[in-house]
Each structure stands twice: as C-alpha cells, then as structure tokens.
Amino acid sequence: MKKQIILGIVAIATLLFTSCETECKEVTTKNITVLVDATDSLLIDRAKHELRKENFEHLINQELGLTESPKCFTVNYDFGIISTHSYYNPTSTELSHTDWGQARNKLVIGWRDFYASHEENLKSLDSINQMESTSLFPTLMKAINKTDGTIIVVSDLIENNPVVNFYKNPPTTPEQMEKTYTEMVSYYLPDGVGKGSEREVVFIVMSEPKNSGVVHKARAFWKYALEEHLGLNVTFADGISTI
C-alpha cells in the first residue's frame, strides 16, 4: 500500500512538473512591418520574389529567434504599400502561440493561415496602377510612428516627390541631407516623428543597374536621416537571406 502511495505521489509530481514545462514563462512579442515599393512593375516583381513564402518564413523565424526548442510568441505583422500618395493603411495579421501544451496541429494551422495571409498581400500588388513618382518618405515615417519593432522596406530607395527628386538632385553632403529632410518633414509631417529605441529599419535594396549611382546616394541619405534624427538602427541588405 505504501509503495502505491509513493508511486502515486511521484506520478502527480511528474505531471505537475511536465505541466509547468509547457506553460509560458516568457512570451516573445515581435512587431514587424513590411513596406513594398509599388511604384515600378519591376520592383513589384522582384519584391514578390524576395518575399516568397520560404524567405518570409526565414524572416519571421529569425525575428522570433525560434530554434528547435519552441518558445511562446506573438507576431504582429503589418503589410503596407509605398505609392505615389502618402496614404498608409496597412493590412494587419497576428499569429500567437502562448502554451506549448496545446495540440501541435493548432500551431501548424496557425502558421499556415499566417503565410496564406502574407501571400494574399503579395497578390494585392498586382492591382496597383503605374505610378508617376515615389513618395517613400511619408509612408515610411507613418510606419515608423506606428511600429514599435522592425520595419522591412523593399525599395530602390529613390525619392521623387514634390519636395525632392533624387534622380535630378540627390543630396550628397550632410548640409544638403539636413535641408532635404527638414523640407520633407515640413511638407508631409507637421507633427514630426517621435524617437523609438526599440525600432529598426532594414532596407532590402532592389534597383536597376542604370540607377546604381543614385541608389548609392539614396542609401547615404536614409542612413543619415533615420539615424541622426530618429536614433534608429538602419541596415541595408541585398535580400532577406542576407539580413
């Protein structure tokens, strides 16, 4: 009888220990915004290829820091389009998993729906009409204000709006960059943009060889503007796999 009681106590203790192991001690939360430059059909095609499911999966897993030992997490994902207009109304998707004791198939279904939503976002790019100019600045600023996390920008970085035309007159000196930034803030953002130490911007640079010189100057402007004025961490990559 004693032996049975002891075995029973051990079984209960084991069950409780296992139960504790499946509960969240810490939930990883990530806010990710993806902005796609839709001002050029070539950019759209390259962006869709770059953001295909396997690359997007790599990006999300990397942001979450997921390994073979699963974690509890929440991903808040916004998808926005950069166009001629400063309009920004992103499509939002959330994926969360807060208890690894849940049935595994629920998590599989959650990921499947999450990726399906992303692929629908990419398909929506096909309905974009040809643009006359690029207003990356106002869309990016609005995304930065909204996102406390990582903003991925797939673009050639070339600004062409009522204030500045990088094709004709790209800012190259700190003084010119300062002037350009100030003028665009005055034109587009009367309320300005707040600083956020948790925010970072990653540019996936898509461009045509003929514009390589302009793109190089544009990179310098965005790094200066976002680091000097907003204190953001800014990086550039040729693709998601190289981040």
Image (spheres, rainbow, N blue to C red):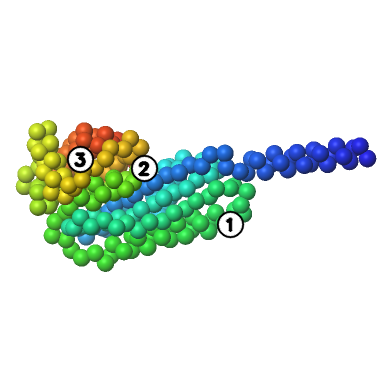
- Looking at this view, is 144 or 111 the one in front? 144
Mark number displayed over residue 149: 2
**Residue 51 visible at all:** no
Q: Is residue 191 above or below residue 130?
A: above
Q: Which picture quadrant has residue 216?
A: top left
Query: How much space separates mark 1 and mark 2, taking CA atoms?
Result: 29 Å
From the viewer's perspective, is 129 left or right of 115? left
Amino acid of disc 1 = Asn
Mark yes or no: residue 119 visible: yes
Q: Amino acid at mark 3?
A: Trp
Label 3: how many residues lie within 10 Å, few (<14), some (14-19) or many (20+)?
A: many
| Image quadrant where one finds the N terminus | top right
Mark seen at residue 139: none
On the image, numbered disc 3 is attached to which residue?
A: 222
The residue that disc 1 covers is 105
Query: Where's residue 28, x and y in %?
Result: 48, 42
Q: Position of residue 69 (x, y in %)?
A: 56, 40
What secondary structure is marked by label 1? helix
